[in-house]
Every structure is written in C-alpha cells, then in structure tokens.
Image: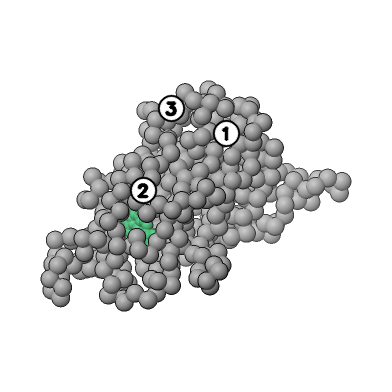
Amino acid sequence: VGVAGGFAAGAAQDGAPSGTDLAVPFHGKHQAGIATTVQQHLYFASFDMTSTADREDLRALLADWTDAAARMTTGREVSPEGAVGGGPYKPPDDTGEALDLAANALTITFGFGPTLFDGRFGLAGRRPKELVELPSFAFDLLEDRFSGGDLCIQACANDPQVAVHAIRNLSRIAFGRAQVRWTQLGYGRTSTTSKAQSTPRNLFGFKDGTANIFSDDTSDLAASVWTDGSDQSWMAGGTYLVARKIQMLIESWDRVRLEEQEAIIGRDKGQGAPLSGGTEFSEPDFDVVSTKAGGPAIPETAHVRLAHPDRNGGARLLRRGYNYVEGNNDLGQLNAGLFFLAFSRSPLQFITIQRSLAGDALNEYIRHIGSALFAVPGGVRPGGSVGDGLFT
Ligand SMILES: C=CC1=C(C)c2cc3[nH]c(cc4nc(cc5[nH]c(cc1n2)c(C)c5CCC(=O)O)C(CCC(=O)O)=C4C)c(C)c3C=C
Ligand SMILES: [Fe+2]
C-alpha cells in the first residue's frame, strides 16, 4: 500500500526512491510525479495532435495512454500480450527494452498545452483562464524546436531505460493521433521534494533544491501547488507545469572565481548555506552586511535573493528539474544545462519570479532556449482516464 507522495514497497537510499522494485501508485487525488519523491532520471515528451485528429481521437488517446501508464508504472508491459505474447505474425505491442526491469519508481504525468483548447477538439470553453502562452522574458532566446506542444508526458524513473521505454511506447500508442514535437532526456535530479532526500547538485556544482517545496509539507502543497478546480472543475487536484530548457555556459562559469560564483548564487558552494550565515537549511537573512565587502552578504543581484518568496509576493514553486548534457557544439563547448520543471497552483508564480530574475547575475551564464506551459489535470480514478473531466 502506497503513501501519499511516496512509494509502494522497498527501502530507500538516503530517503530517495532508489530501489528497482519500488512502484508508485498511479491512481489518486493528484497525478504521481509531482509531489512524488524525485527519481534519478527523466524522459519528457511534448506532443502535437495530428492535423486529422478529432475530439474522439483525443478522448480515446487519453484513455489508451491511461491504461498503458497504469500498467507500466507497476512494472508490467504496455499490454497483456506485451513484447512476446502476441504470436510471431505481428509486431509486438511492447517494444521490450524494459522486459527484465522492474517499476523503478516510474511515474507518468500528463499535461495539456494552451493550443489543445484552440477549438479543434471542442474544448475552447474548457480552457483554464490562466492557460495562455507565457509572456516573453528578458534574455529569452527561445527556439520553436524546444517549445510548446498540445500535450506533454513526463516520465521519471530510477532507471533511464524505464523512462525511455515509457515514452517510446506511449508515442507508439499515439501513432496517427498525436506525434512527438520535442523530447528531453534528463539525468541526475537537480531538486529534492522530500526532507529525507539529500540535496543534489546542478552542473554549476551548487546544491540545488534546498529551499524547494517538500511533499512532506501538505500545507505548502495546498497553498502553492494544487489547484482547487474553481475555474475549471477538471483541474481540481491539478497544477500547472512550466518547462524551460536552460543552456548553461559551462566553460565561462568554470573560469569564474569561487568567491564570485558564490556571490552570483548567494550561497556557498561547499554546503549550500546562505552567504548570510548558518548551514544549508538556515533561512537567508538579506539584511546581513558582509564584513569583507561592506555591502549585503547576499548581493542585490544574487539568484537566491531575487528568487526568494519575500521578493515575489510570497510566490513559490515546486521545482523538479534535471541536468542534461547533449554533446558539444562546433567550438567544442558543452551543450549542457538544466531542464527546469516547476509545478505551481498558477503560472503567475513562475512569471513573477522569472520577471524578478531579470536582474539576476546568473543571466550572464545561462540562456533559456526552450519553454512550454501545461495544465496538469488532477489524479486518475480507478476505471477513469486522465483528463476525462474535459469531456463530461
Ligand atoms: C523562475 C524560476 C527559476 C529559474 C528559471 C531558475 C534557474 C536556475 N536556478 C539555478 C540554481 C539555483 N537556484 C536556487 C534556488 C532557487 N531558484 C528558484 C527559481 C528559479 N531558478 C527558486 C524559487 C529558488 C529558491 C529561492 C529561495 O526560496 O531561497 C539555488 C539555491 C538552492 C535552492 O534553494 O535550490 C540554486 C543553486 C540555476 C543554475 C538555474 C538555471 C540554470
Ligand atoms: Fe534557481
């Protein structure tokens, strides 16, 4: 029997869902993969409905995806016939690469982009008011090939093959109804959603996720993450997902003095403590003056000062991002960065913080190159389908 935001079986290393046999319950009030303790790997896909698909195709696709996801998250194959049980005379239902692998804490989370409500599927009246394209921000260098989409699927697992298998098989199921627009592979979580987990590091070498919203804190989740359905009833127990592909200029960063790196972030690199003093989980004190420099210990342009709720009308995010590395460019520089994923009760929480980050010293070392916003419906009832409230 699973626990809220937790796992059905197995022991966890440092509180993280590391056991291969761990299965996260698929059904519930909220979709899994949000407050769920963050797994080690991610495969994320954005889809567009095909030009010939209609409302019934969308409804049937969501039902088929739900059945397949419910099976795969328990470590089963995508259908009862699976990879080898369908006989020699047809392509197997399941692609087979996860055959000997258990559930690995796989979660599959579905979201709907603003374009799904443009009238093609008779859903214009079901669009949540806040589900509109994100505004442009200072320093945006967005590319279409990493942005947007009618639908998204986030697959997280402790074995990358399990996450890739899930997206690959869900893409196959979509054939003729929806096609992949872009995908993102993420290795190494850059956040924690449980106080039992250790804080991981991003590619700039800093602890990331220290001041995150934790699944152990249900009042924070209620205040900042879950939507109540007062706008659209199908969004009860849901949330919004912002995805940003952020390229990190690794070589430039690596030439920055340690003291300056820490001033840019506003925390020390070793243990992740705020520069105002204390240890990793001490609250930053923005009034503390640096004895050495004379100015604020956490500079005015420091990332954590500008991202802090005090600076943003109390706005907070549940961050669930992953590192990515995709080879090198023509100059031999790393194509690498942070696939930033954040869940919030309203997209305004991200918009407010991202606007505040216009003055962030970090901007010299990062570029936002992809962006998407999705409405994530509430959890799936046994026997129901994800987003089935859209069609009632
Ligand atoms: C708009 C939201 C944010 C973006 C985009 C973003 C990018 C980004 N962040 C780091 C590294 C760190 N971020 C840290 C804290 C932090 N970041 C955001 C928001 C965005 N970050 C928030 C809300 C917070 C918490 C602020 C607080 O309440 O104190 C930290 C410190 C450790 C932590 O708390 O997680 C680091 C390090 C990078 C490298 C990056 C883009 C590539
Ligand atoms: Fe950040």
Type of the residue with mark 3 = Ser
What is the x, y in percent for residue 29? 46, 37
| Numbered circles on residues, count | 3
Of mark 2 and mark 3, the one earlier in the sequence is: 2
Residue 56 can be seen in this image? yes
Residue 357: % across, % down = 30, 54
Badge 1 density bin: few <14, some 14–19, many ≥20, Cα 10 Å:
many
Q: 200 or 240, which is in the foreground? A: 240
* Residue count near mark 3 (Cα–Cα under 10 Å), binned few <14, some 14–19, many ≥20: some
Find residue 385 and name its label: 1
Looking at this view, name the residue that lies furthest to the front.
331
What residue is at 69 percent from the left and 40 percent from the top?
175
Q: Earlier in the sequence, mark 3 or mark 1?
A: 3
Give SS at disc 1.
loop
Is residue 34 in sight in this rendering?
Answer: no
- Where is residue 294? Give x, y as percent: 12, 71
User: What's the residue type where badge 1 is placed?
Assistant: Ser
| Amino acid tagged 2 | Phe
Q: Quadrant of residue 233?
A: top left
What kind of element bears circle 2? Answer: loop
- Indicate left or right for 324 with 306 as reference: right
Give the mark nearest the N terminus, 2 or 1.
2
User: Which residue is located at x 47 percent, y 45 percent?
Assistant: 372
Q: Report which residue position mark 2 lands on.
A: 137
Query: Residue sitting at 42 percent across and 35 percent down?
Result: 131
Picture quarter containing residue 273?
A: bottom left
Q: Choose mark 2 or mark 1, whichever is in front.
A: 2
- Identify the residue position indicated by label 3 in the image: 233
Which corner quadrant of the figure contains ligand 2?
bottom left
> Please, is residue 59 above or below residue 36 in the view?
above
- Image quadrant assignment for residue 351: top left
Going by the image, does 230 lie left or right of 280? Answer: right
